[in-house]
């Protein structure tokens, strides 16, 4: 007995050592753990979704030793934002991840190959005899989205017991299982596949909506930077005029033409302009940093780069912008192009499919199964396999039924799915109403900015005439320095208002295009994936 115990212990130990050696050899080089493998890497084989200009200009080569041109047009700013914005790069992986989950859902219905092999040994009372059996099985199985499971397997068992007449057995089995209630039909698997496909499409619309918002934010930041620079230049010129007036007043006070109390007005106006200059310089720096953050040109110290706007915001004075009269057409366009609305529709469809699956889950589990097997016996594998034609066969079929008492989990899941579907329907309707409001508000803002362009121009011309009149009155002694300073202050406000009206009109146009979902199309921005255009 002790000898047999040592024999079997040694045999088990040898099997374990063999298993460890084989498993170590089966590990590929990429699967073996190394400290360098723990370092973060960027997978090079992931094809992300990216946005680019349809007619992207070729970059101009920069001569060696020469710094990049700080002049930046609004089109170049948009192109840089699409190429380098870090938040956009992060979101570009969203559809890739959704597509991977889609393949995971579909992969559940791929055919599965399986195989197994084993050996058993039984010690008999006779120390010189033993019962050894070797078995092997291989086959294929596949689950279908309709709730059907198919399987086919072939098995062979070899029994070397001395008391067995035909020690070898070969068996072929075909089996079919079909869900009849729960899990049957489209609810069995097609719902999950369709939902994953909708999730991929929804993630693309979500990415498009973000890219459109990024383009709008970049253009608005660009024009706000232009506005801040122009306001700063106006304040600088106004400060120079105030200083010149202060010098003239001091000179006239020194020669006795003006009383000394006139100096306080001009001195106060110079101090006020210096304060405005500090604020305008701070505003320019803030918008420069915001613009650089959006376009993210990269490189060390990129926030310290100088940016000179190259696009002129001025509107042709001979062509006054027309009022927007096609509100209904623009609203219809928004209903077609808005990516957030398209995403909401897909989410609602997903929720509708979810109610189909949860409603099916309320049913009992009733499956039909049928197995067809052929078995043959012989002395050796070839003898047993050749005897399959004359061997035994077996057919078994039946039904299996199961159901949870009260079935509260399935009922609660279905109730939640119905409520979520209703919630998505209400949210979609609210989004439609919001889009109507967005377009109307954008058109209203455009009309306000359009009218302000003409009104601010008239106001600025009137203020220029007022300043000239006050200067002439001051020169002949009929006016005061305070009145001149007030007129110049009003002129400064009028000049800034005129510049703001033009910039605000351009920003209002951007927001209208964003509200109607046409900004990317108008800017020639296309979505590409693996070289293919997605949004055309």
Image (cartoon, helix red, strand yellow):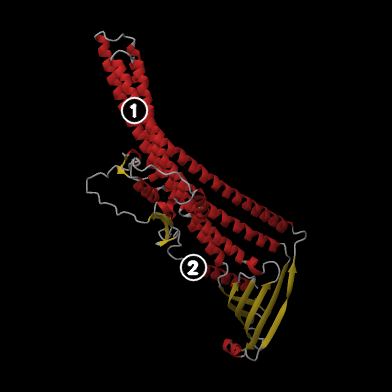
- The x, y position of residue 412, in whole percent, is 71, 55
Image-quadrant location for residue 289: top left
- The x, y position of residue 359, in whole percent, is 69, 61
Q: Which disc number belongs to residue 153?
A: none
**Between marks 1 and 2 in the image, the one whose residue lies nearer the viewer:** 1
Question: Height in image: 483 above or below 52?
Answer: above
Residue nearer the viewer, 509 or 201: 509
Which class describes the residues within 10 Å of circle 1: few (<14), some (14-19), or many (20+)? many
Instruction: Give the residue at x 43% y 52%.
Output: 520
Determine whether the residue tagged by mark 2 lies in a helix, strand or loop.
Answer: helix
For the C terminus, the image quarter is bottom left
- The x, y position of residue 132, in whole percent, is 62, 80
Q: Which disc number belongs to residue 21?
A: 2
Determine whether the residue tagged by mark 1 lies in a helix, strand or loop.
Answer: helix
**Gap between marks 1 and 2 measured at Cα:** 82 Å
Whether residue 108 is visible: yes
For the N terminus, the image quarter is bottom right
Which residue in the rendered view is the most extreme toward the right? 405
Instruction: Give the residue at x 36% y 38%.
Output: 226
- The x, y position of residue 43, in whole percent, is 42, 58
Image-quadrant location for residue 29: bottom left
Residue nearer the viewer, 499 or 2: 499
Q: Which disc number belongs to residue 235?
A: 1
Whether residue 163 is visible: no
Which residue in the rendered view is the most extreme toward the left? 64
Q: Are marks 1 and 2 in contact (CB under 8 Å)?
A: no
Residue nearer the viewer, 417 or 463: 463
Horizontal side, residue 266 vs residue 521: left or right: left
Choose the circle earlier in sequence order: 1 or 2: 2
Image-quadrant location for residue 44: bottom left
Which class describes the residues within 10 Å of circle 2: few (<14), some (14-19), or many (20+)? few
């Amino acid at each position: 007995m002790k000898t047999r115990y040592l024999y079997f212990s040694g045999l088990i130990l040898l099997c374990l050592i063999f298993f460890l050696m084989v498993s170590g050899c089966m590990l590929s080089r990429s699967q073996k753990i190394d400290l360098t493998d723990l370092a973060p890497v960027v997978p090079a084989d992931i094809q992300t979704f990216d946005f680019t200009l349809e007619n992207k200009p070729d970059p101009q080569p920069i001569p060696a030793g020469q710094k990049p041109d700080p002049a930046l047009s609004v089109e170049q700013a948009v192109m840089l934002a699409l190429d380098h914005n870090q938040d956009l790069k992060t979101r570009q992986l969203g559809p890739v991840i959704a597509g991977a989950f889609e393949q995971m859902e579909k992969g559940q219905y791929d055919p599965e190959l399986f195989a197994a092999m084993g050996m058993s040994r039984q010690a008999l009372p006779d120390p010189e005899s033993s019962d050894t059996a070797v078995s092997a099985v291989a086959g294929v199985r596949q689950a279908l989205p309709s709730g059907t499971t198919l399987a086919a397997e072939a098995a062979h068992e070899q029994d070397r017991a001395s008391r067995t007449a035909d020690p070898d057995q070969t068996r072929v089995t075909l089996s079919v299982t079909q869900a009849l209630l729960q899990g049957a039909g489209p609810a069995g698997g097609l719902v999950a596949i369709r939902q994953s496909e909708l999730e991929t499409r929804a993630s693309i619309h979500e990415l498009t909506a973000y890219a459109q918002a990024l383009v709008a934010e970049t253009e608005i930041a660009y024009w706000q930077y232009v506005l801040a620079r122009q306001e700063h230049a106006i304040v600088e010129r106004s400060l120079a005029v105030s200083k010149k007036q202060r010098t003239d007043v001091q000179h006239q006070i020194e020669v006795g033409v003006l009383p000394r109390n006139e100096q306080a007005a001009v001195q106060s106006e110079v101090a006020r302009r210096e304060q405005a200059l500090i604020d305008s310089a701070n505003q320019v720096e803030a918008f420069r940093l915001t613009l650089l953050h959006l376009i993210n040109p990269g490189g060390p110290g990129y926030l310290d780069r100088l940016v000179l706007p190259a696009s002129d915001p001025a509107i042709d004075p001979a062509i006054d912008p027309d009022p927007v009269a096609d509100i209904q057409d623009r609203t219809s366009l928004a209903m077609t192009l808005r990516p957030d609305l398209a995403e909401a529709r897909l989410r609602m469809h997903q929720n509708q499919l979810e109610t189909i699956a949860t409603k099916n889950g309320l049913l009992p589990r009733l499956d039909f199964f049928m197995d067809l097997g052929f078995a043959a016996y012989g002395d050796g594998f070839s003898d047993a396999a050749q005897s399959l034609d004359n061997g035994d066969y077996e057919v078994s079929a039946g039904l299996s039924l199961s159901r949870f008492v009260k079935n509260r989990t399935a009922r609660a899941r279905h109730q939640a799915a119905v409520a979520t579907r209703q919630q998505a329907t209400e949210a979609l309707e609210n989004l439609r109403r919001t889009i109507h409001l967005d377009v109307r508000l954008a058109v209203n803002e455009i009309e306000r900015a359009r009218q302000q362009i003409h009104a601010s121009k008239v106001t600025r011309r009137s203020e220029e005439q007022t300043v000239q009149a006050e200067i002439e009155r001051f020169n002949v002694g009929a006016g005061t320095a305070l009145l001149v300073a007030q007129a110049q202050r009003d002129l400064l406000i009028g000049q800034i208002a005129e510049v703001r009206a033009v910039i605000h009109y351009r920003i209002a146009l951007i927001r209208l295009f964003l509200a109607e979902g046409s900004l990317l199309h108008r800017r020639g921005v296309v979505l590409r994936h693996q070289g293919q255009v997605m949004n055309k």
